[in-house]
Image (cartoon, helix red, strand yellow):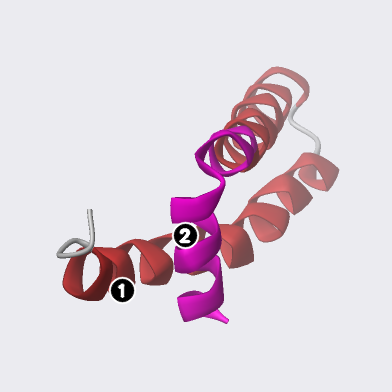
Amino acid sequence: MFRAYAHFSVNHPFVHKFNLLAVLSIFVVSSYELLANESIIFSLGFVLVAFPMLVFAKASDYKQKYLSAQN
């Protein structure tokens, strides 16, 4: 899955940037809401962001190791 997303991010950079922006905005909004409202329900945003960040990190590592020679 990481390899497939690494290839996807190389082939479709604008969609990848939109995915990053969406995940980061969820993180920022849930952080703000958690601090402002002090309601534990807003911590679900951190759980929602954990898996995509792992995929982005592993795909980035794969892209640096194996796809950088193609660019």
Q: Is residue 3 one of those drawn in magenta? A: yes
Identify which residue is drawn at 64% across, 28% down.
25
Q: Which residue is tagged 2?
A: 56
Q: Sequence order check: which comes first, mark 2 or mark 1?
A: 2
Q: Quadrant of residue 41?
A: top right
**Rendering coords of residue 24 (x, y %):** 57, 35
Front one among 18 and 66: 66
Q: Residue at x 81, y 36 (%)?
A: 39
- Where does the magenta region start and end? 1-18
Horizontally, residue 60 falls left or right of residue 2, namely left
Picture quadrant of residue 36: top right
Of the two numbered discs 2 and 1 in the rendering, the one whose residue sits closer to the viewer = 1
Helix, strand or loop at disc 2?
A: helix
**Is 33 above or below relative to 46?**
above
Q: How many marks?
A: 2
Tell me if 43 is positioned left or right of 23 in this view: right
Question: Could you give the CA–CA distance between mark 2 and mark 1, rounded to whole angstroms?
Answer: 10 Å
Disc ID at residue 27? none
- Image coordinates of residue 53 in percent, x first then y, are 51, 58
What quarter of the picture does the N terminus occupy?
bottom right
Q: Nearer the viewer, residue 39 or 24?
A: 24
Please state the horizontal and vertical placement of residue 10, each as a whole percent of the image: 44, 53
Kind of residue sitting beneath label 2:
Phe
Is residue 56 depicted above or below 15 in this figure? below
Looking at this view, is 30 or 69 the one in front? 69
Crowdedness of circle 2 by 10 Å Cα count: few (<14), some, many (20+)? some
Residue carrying label 1: 62
Residue 16 vs residue 40, the one in the foreground: 16
Near mark 1 (Cα within 10 A), the count class, few <14, some 14-19 or many ≥20, is some
In the displayed structure, 9 sits above or below 14; it is: below
Label 1, secondary structure: give it. helix
